[in-house]
Image: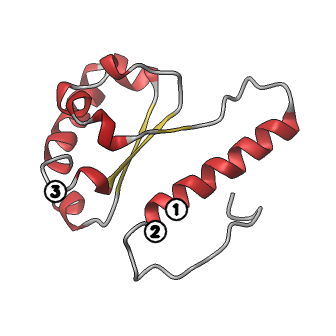
Amino acid sequence: MGAIDDSYRTVFVVSCKFLEYEWPTFAMKVASRYSFREGRENMNIIILLDDMKQSEFPKLIRDIWHKIRPLHWPNEHNTDKTRLRTARKLFWEKLLKRIRKGNKRLVACSLSESTI
């Protein structure tokens, strides 16, 4: 909990499988109760690996869903490799923008293929 409190951003990477199991769900509930408390809602980033519904998340997260705006990892099943590569690049750009938002200490950097 101290690491969450000391962090500028908290990133949750969530899949359908993750939410199926009791221990990860419990861990997410505990972490979300601590990191999504009032005043920290915008400090959290949720990355969805699968198509998931808001109703699948713990109540605390569902209640502030409009503030979270999760990012969606591009679908691996996309057969068009060029579109998939473009979607992944856009994903990384959005993630970097969210991480930087409001943090003047972060030095501007650009995404490169080696970063991705």
As helix, strand or loop, the secondary structure at mark 3 comes to loop
Q: Which mark is residue 39?
A: 3
Task: Report the quarter where the C terminus lies.
Answer: bottom right
As helix, strand or loop, the secondary structure at mark 1 comes to helix
Where does the image place residue 47, in percent across and percent down from the top left? 47, 40
Residue lying at 30% horizontally and 34% vertically, measured from the top left? 65
Q: Quadrant of residue 6?
A: bottom left
Q: Which residue is mark 1?
A: 97
Where does the image place residue 35, in percent across and percent down from the top left? 20, 50
Type of residue at label 2?
A: Arg
Residue lying at 40% horizontally and 83% vertically, measured from the top left? 105
Where does the image place residue 67, in percent across and percent down from the top left? 31, 43
Q: Residues within 10 Å of mark 3 (few under 14, many from 20)?
A: few
Type of residue at label 3?
A: Gly
Q: Tell me the distance, in whole angstroms, between the alpha carbons under discs 1 and 3.
A: 20 Å
Q: Classify residue 43 as left or right of residue 76.
A: left
Q: Tell me the distance, in whole angstroms, between the alpha carbons under discs 2 and 1.
A: 5 Å
Q: Which residue is mark 2?
A: 100
Q: Residues within 10 Å of mark 1 (few under 14, many from 20)?
A: few
Q: Say if 98 sits above or below 73 in the image.
A: below
Q: Tell me the distance, in whole angstroms, between the alpha carbons under discs 2 and 3.
A: 18 Å
Q: Which mark is residue 5?
A: none
The reply to whether the C-beta atoms of the residues labelled 2 and 1 are less than 8 Å apart is yes
